[in-house]
Image (cartoon, rainbow, N blue to C red):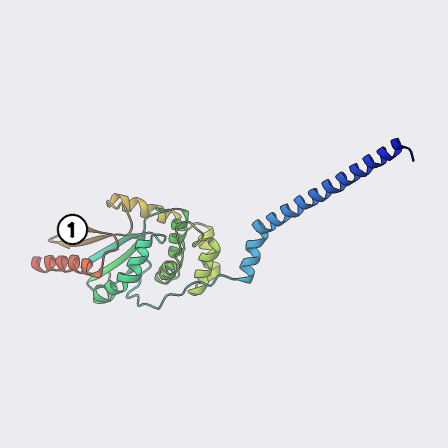
Amino acid sequence: MSKEMSKRQKMREKRARETTRNRLVNIGLIVVGALIVFGVFVGPVLNQLLNPFEPVIPEARAFPNADDNALGASDAPITITEYSDFQCPYCARFWADTEEQLIQAYVETGQVRFVYRSFGAFIGPESGAAAEAAYCAGAQNKFWDMHGILFANQTGENVGAYSNSKLGSFAEAIGLDLDAYNDCMKSNQFADRVTQDGIDGINAGIQATPSFVVSYVVNGETRTSVIKGAQPFSEFQTAIEAALAEIAAAQ
């Protein structure tokens, strides 16, 4: 074999090795891309199938004279309207630490009517979605059950805690008619109501959640005050007793 032929043979072998190496690199890139696609699109679905979401179920509470988003006698001398956000950690703190005590002491006894309203999509889109879910549950006389399970499963702000699938899991857990619930959510039946909540809250001077408007009538005049933040029960007790004293003095 001549030196020139040996040289050409070596060049062909080199080109063949380069072609094989490039083919392997391309195959490797395709495999990596497929794995990325799998991780982004298929991985979460597979994870959900292997680890289905189980909502936290709060302990049962009494809901005296529940009427949609209100509790208590309609003729109670004092009305407390809470403007809240299901994503708000301080709202969850009030629900966990104070709300039940307030209901037992003043709502069950007929002295206070307690009303929950959203503050629109104050913190973000999941705030609005959760509020709509609560009102859809209210259409089935389950507002306060949804209210509790929403707060019990709060995990952060706009991080998927109130995704459509999780809201549906809450609806199932509290025993809603899922067809009616899904129709309510898909039609955005209460979207305008949630928006109006935010407008009314702003008009009432609310700037943050939770805030509580305490209102009562003395000598035909409506008097109001606002309790700001997740205050302890004693703060509400002071405001309520002062209002009751004013009402009694005027009689």
Q: Residues within 10 Å of mark 1 (few under 14, many from 20)?
A: few
* Residue 139 visible to the viewer: no
Residue closer to the observer: 139 or 4: 4
Give the x, y percent position of residue 101. 25, 65
**In the image shown, does 120 or 123 lie closer to the viewer?**
123
Q: Residue furthest top?
A: 4
Which secondary structure, mark 1? strand
Residue 237: x and y in percent read: 18, 60
Above-or-below relation of 220 to 172: above
Residue found farthest to the front: 3
> Is 204 displayed left or right of 192 in the figure?
left
The quadrant in which the C terminus is found is bottom left
Q: Quadrant of the N terminus?
A: top right
Is 218 on the left-hand or right-hand side of 144? left
The answer to whether residue 229 is left or right of residue 177 is left
Residue 60: x and y in percent read 35, 68
In this view, the residue in front, 106 or 113, is: 106
Residue at image point 22% right, 59% down: 232
Residue 91 falls in which quadrant of the image? bottom left
Along the viewing direction, whichever of 183 and 245 lies nearer the viewer: 245
Write down the quadrant of residue 104 in the picture: bottom left
- Residue at the (35%, 68%) spot, across then down: 59
Q: How many marks?
A: 1
Disc 1: which residue: 223
The amino acid on which the numbered mark 1 sits, given as a three-letter code, is Arg
Indicate the quadrant where residue 13 lies. top right
168 in relation to 29, above or below:
below
Asked whether residue 44 is in view, the answer is: yes
- Measured from the top left, where is residue 167 in percent x and y? 44, 57
